[in-house]
Image (tube, rainbow, N blue to C red):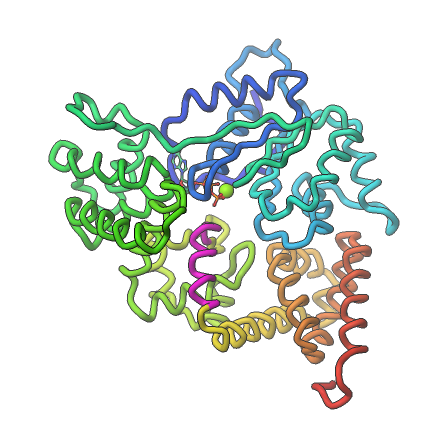
Amino acid sequence: MEGLRNNLPLPLTSFIGREDEIAEITGLLEEPHCRLLTLVGPGGIGKTRLALEVAQGLVNPEMDASTEPLFPNGVYLVALQPVALPDDIITTIASAIGFEFYQARDPKAQLYRYLAKKCLLLILDNFEHLLDAIELIEELLAKAPQVDLLVTSRSALNLVQEWLYHLEGMAYPQDGPIDAPEAFGAVQLFVERARRARHSFSLVEEGKHVIQICQLVDGMPLGIELAAAWLRRLPCDEIAAELQRSLDILESDLHGLPDRHRSMRAVLSHSWSLLSREEREVLMKLSVFRGGFRREAAEYVASATLQNLSTLVDHSMLRLTITGRYEIHELQRQYAAEKLAERPELETAVRNRHCEYFADFMDQPPINLVGKRSKETMQALEADIDNIRLAWNWAVGQTRIRDLHRCIETMYWFSWFRAWPQDVKRAFRQAVGALRVAEPSQERD
Ligand SMILES: Nc1ncnc2c1ncn2[C@@H]1O[C@H](COP(=O)(O)OP(=O)(O)OP(=O)(O)O)[C@@H](O)[C@H]1O
Ligand SMILES: [Mg+2]
């Protein structure tokens, strides 16, 4: 049977374990009353990956032809982590499901009207920073009675309609003699990722230390992946010892942090310390991007060489997707962004470079905007829409008039192409407001 409509990304790495969780979550989605299910847990615990795995099962169900699919109109991932403003949620959902607005007025009402007749699942991924927008969730549930929401978030939404699923780390052996460590999800994940770093890796020889590492990171999949990537530089026993040391250091610094956060922090800080000065500097600068980036952008904004990027991929600090874009895990991005924030002057300089790069990217010759090439141009712009929004907002905040000017025409055409005039009107209004308050002596073009 052909799979249902979806926009699910192809996974870059294998998925391990979590059979019980998948069955439980799928079971909850089958319940008619469960229309808003939130997977809650700390950063790096595996919420996004699990939601995607559940979604894959719904899109390609193992069933005979007579069984009705649960969501006949499809399953869609709405990546919210790069979305800064609640107002952008509507356009991000529309983009994810491939809905095009047909008129300028009231995009929200248009989207609701469309969804009212659909029976589909939206995965709202990384919702934690948009909790101010929860009325929108209530509204969506009311206006689209056959749409279900699977949300991933580091904290609960606290809506009456919400069903909560608290996600724990992956299973690992506790103390005592262990007969079959390979039966535990956390150990399987470590071994699988370790073999990528060192193909001769053997659990038989390293079992004791692998178990220790899984215990130290409390079964957190992101922690396990990062620790396994260190095998390029350290033997397994040293990884365990280093992790223990980082934890001890953090113990005194981070009193009051829950264990799981502390163990993840220990992994992040040790991964950081394994990078060279230059690689750290690059990663720090790359943290200004939103929604990933292309190599040319990294070169300009972060002075990243191909060698730097490859090393960061090798250390599992970056991922290279099949579309050729680089992505950084949100938790790792936040860690690197904290480091950048410790150097405000550098941060401003990098943000200026980011703004300049995307203003240049927006400054397209007219032939690319309205001619035969327009579709291609618009698709390229759409892939970087989160960076463009960020650059625009930075230009407005810093009254970078020349950069704003370079964006305007493309913004206008883009708004027609995507039929997002509300978005663009708001952006223009912000810019006009900023220009009004700008001193006459400030940059002018
Ligand atoms: N069951 C699994 N099998 C293989 N890899 C996994 C599994 N669960 C998580 N991972 C990997 O661990 C990392 C962290 O997982 P994920 O991104 O899903 O965490 P998260 O809870 O969504 O974090 P955040 O709150 O920061 O978004 C990812 O690289 C993911 O691919
Ligand atoms: Mg996530």
Q: In this orientation, which residue lies closer to the viewer: 218 or 95?
A: 218
Q: Which residues are magenta?
A: 328-341
Q: Is residue 37 left or right of residue 434?
A: left
Q: Position of residue 17 (x, y in %)?
A: 37, 27
Q: Determine the residue positioned at 33% across, 28% down.
A: 171
Q: Is residue 138 left or right of residue 384?
A: right
Q: Quadrant of residue 348?
A: bottom right
Provide the major secondary structure of the magenta segment: helix
Q: Quadrant of residue 100?
A: top right
Q: Position of residue 44 (x, y in %)?
A: 43, 42
With respect to residue 138, does 316 lie above or below? below
With respect to residue 141, does 300 lie above or below? below
The N terminus - image quarter: top right
Q: Determine the residue positioned at 49% across, 55% down.
A: 325
Q: Is residue 43 magenta?
A: no
Q: Determine the residue positioned at 50% across, 19% down.
A: 24
Q: Quadrant of ligand 1?
A: top left
